[in-house]
Amino acid sequence: MTSQQHNNRMMHLGGKAKRNRRDVKMHHSWRRRRRRRKRKRKEKIEVAKFVCQLQDYQDEFHQIWRHGTGSGSLSHAIIRTIAPTGHLYTVEFHQQRAEKAIEEFREHEVDHLVTVKNQDVCKNGFGVTNVADAVFLDIPSPWEAIGHAKLALKYEGGRICSFSPCIEQVQRTCLALQEHGFTEINTSEILLRVYNVRTVSLQIPDLGRAAEDDSTAAFDRGTQTDQDVPCVANLQQGTVQFKSGVPPREMVGHTGYLTFATKSLF
């Protein structure tokens, strides 16, 4: 192999390696975008379900504590719901996320309605006692924070909500809620199924009564002829069109569960 051939081969291999690295980067970028879309889709449904519950108690909820700030979508929705008299206290374990949330709240001019804290609720609690009207938990192990949430909630009637993506987490959370004396425990699945509405054509079934009904009708009117019978039979054996909702066979995304409970005085 000559030196020119060797250089050409090395250039070819180098260009191929660059293309492979570029493809790998594009694949990882696509996966990151897909994960972000999934998180946004989950948070939209989560926000809608939880805010609907908040609106039922809008006049009673003035102080809400949340553990797990995340992207801040739910925090913004809570702020809009309880403003202008309510206040949100959101606790984030990761310091960088807490600092980012503080910056976003300040930019959106809602920082006077929210307080961001950086601490681990599962170990140290919320740091308050009997003052919260509601507590929202969005953490991997919410059952570890149930006792702290109960301590933070007001004496009677405080509501707690927990989001979990897996049913095993829901089971442990419900057991912890029951052990700490919470009542009205219920869980809702948040995965929404969008039905496709389309026109469906179905053949009208022949139940064997067409000929009998046609003969009776002709006898009663006295105007039915033998030539009319095949036409009616053809109508009975025809098709009918109607609108129908069909669920998708496959759904992109992961489901989740919202668990609600009420603090009892006894």
Image (cartoon, rainbow, N blue to C red):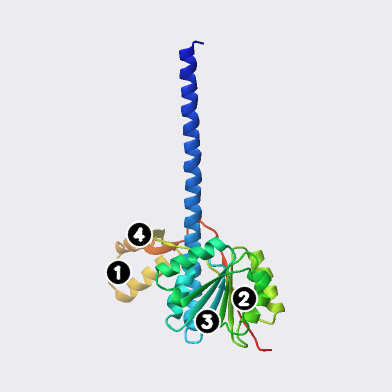
Which residue type does callout 1 highlight?
A: Gln
Residue 224 — which label?
Answer: 1
Q: Calculate the distance from the C-alpha at mark 3 to the C-alpha at mark 1.
A: 78 Å
Is residue 205 visible to us here? no
Q: Calculate the distance from the C-alpha at mark 4 to the C-alpha at mark 1.
A: 16 Å
Residue 147: name its quadrant. Answer: bottom right
* Earlier residue among tags 1 and 2: 2
Residue 234 — which label?
Answer: 4
Label 2 belongs to which residue? 126
Tell me: residue 61, above or below residue 7.
Answer: below
Which residue type does callout 3 highlight?
A: Gln
Which residue type does callout 4 highlight?
A: Asn
Residue 63 — which label?
Answer: 3
Question: In the figure, is residue 21 to the left or right of 173?
Answer: left
Tell me: residue 173, above or below residue 132.
Answer: above
Q: Which secondary structure, mark 3?
A: strand
Q: Residue furthest left?
A: 223
Which residue type does callout 2 highlight?
A: Phe
* Earlier residue among tags 4 and 1: 1
The front one of 94 and 136 is: 94
Residue at image location 49% in from the left, 69% down from the top: 74
Q: Comparing marks 2 and 4, which lies closer to the viewer?
A: 2
- For the residues labelled 4 and 1, say whether their Cβ atoms are less than 8 Å apart: no
Q: Calculate the distance from the C-alpha at mark 2 to the C-alpha at mark 4.
A: 74 Å
Q: Comparing marks 1 and 2, which lies closer to the viewer?
A: 2
Residue 209 position, x and y percent, is 44, 67
* Earlier residue among tags 3 and 1: 3
Q: Residues within 10 Å of mark 2 (few under 14, many from 20)?
A: many
The front one of 225 and 74 is: 74
Residue 151 position, x and y percent, is 65, 81
